[in-house]
Image: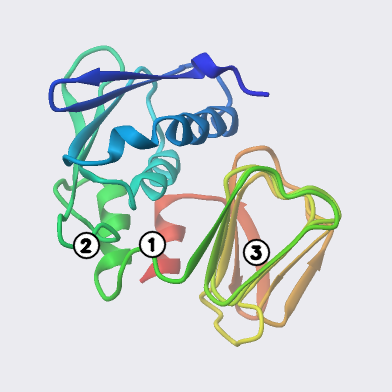
Amino acid sequence: MPNDNLVIFKGEVDGLLVMLDEEARFEDLLRCFIKKLEQNKGFFDGAKIVVRFKGRKLGEFEKECIIELLATQNIVEIVFLHPFDDEATERLTITPKEKKKIVKNTNSKAAAIINARSKDKPRISNTYYHAGILRSGQEIVQDGCIVVMGDVNPGAVVKASENIIILGTLKGRAFAGDGNDNKKSFIISYGINAEQIGITNHIVNSPRTKMCAQIAYIDKEQIYIKEIDFKSLQNMIE
């Protein structure tokens, strides 16, 4: 179980300061963050607030995960601060009319990803969220995207007609673009040590990767798995 002190919420005049542990594994940090969100649901009711993150330098993929979790909350602005001072590295604004869209307010890579996703359609569309570990014998099937906020254990199955994002390690089976021929579908996970993955009609058995953010995608009728970077993700979402 993650330490509850990995994430600390502190109320401020205009919103919330979130202190992130600098040493913890990101998946542990994320689980703790999800737990704190559940425990503090009432904080996001009523007036719109600003959320500031401090204490840990987040990578682009990590910021994207945090933003996904906050996108449906009653938040008008998300600010990522420098680890050692109060200067904002990025400032992202959530529109009051449509919480599911996030508007670019910076030239950073993270904002470019957000802007590309929300240019033609709502940022979160037909997405199913599962909070916690998906255990052996459990199966999620979704016409759209799936976000699993935890590990997918051996014997568990995730099937989505679009994309799959796992904020943990994929050890079971995952099938993106299931039931269609959308070769832009992809699977993102923090480590892919799966029993099997599939994208559209392409299958790979027992892929193994190092423990970092990985993306599986189709190129020239083959599934490739590599460490995620801005360029590869941008190609997937454009």
- What amino acid type is highlighted by mark number 1? Gln
In the picture, the quarter occupied by the N terminus is top right
- Earlier along the polypeptide chain: callout 2 or callout 1? 2
Q: Which mark is residue 234?
A: 1
Can I make out residue 6 in this image?
Answer: yes
Q: Residue at x 56, y 20 (%)?
A: 24
Q: Position of residue 78 (x, y in %)?
A: 24, 38
Can I make out residue 23 in this image?
Answer: no
Q: Estimate the spatial distance between the alpha carbons at disc 1 and disc 3, rounded to whole Å.
A: 16 Å
Q: Which mark is residue 12?
A: none
Q: Which residue is mark 3?
A: 224
Q: Residue at x 53, y 28 (%)?
A: 32
Specify whether 111 is left or right of 152: left
- What amino acid type is highlighted by mark number 3? Tyr
Tag 2 near tag 1, CB within 8 Å: no
Q: Quadrant of residue 122?
A: bottom left
Q: Give the structural element (helix, strand or loop) at label 1.
A: helix
Q: Which residue is mark 2?
A: 98
21 w.r.t. 187: above or below:
above
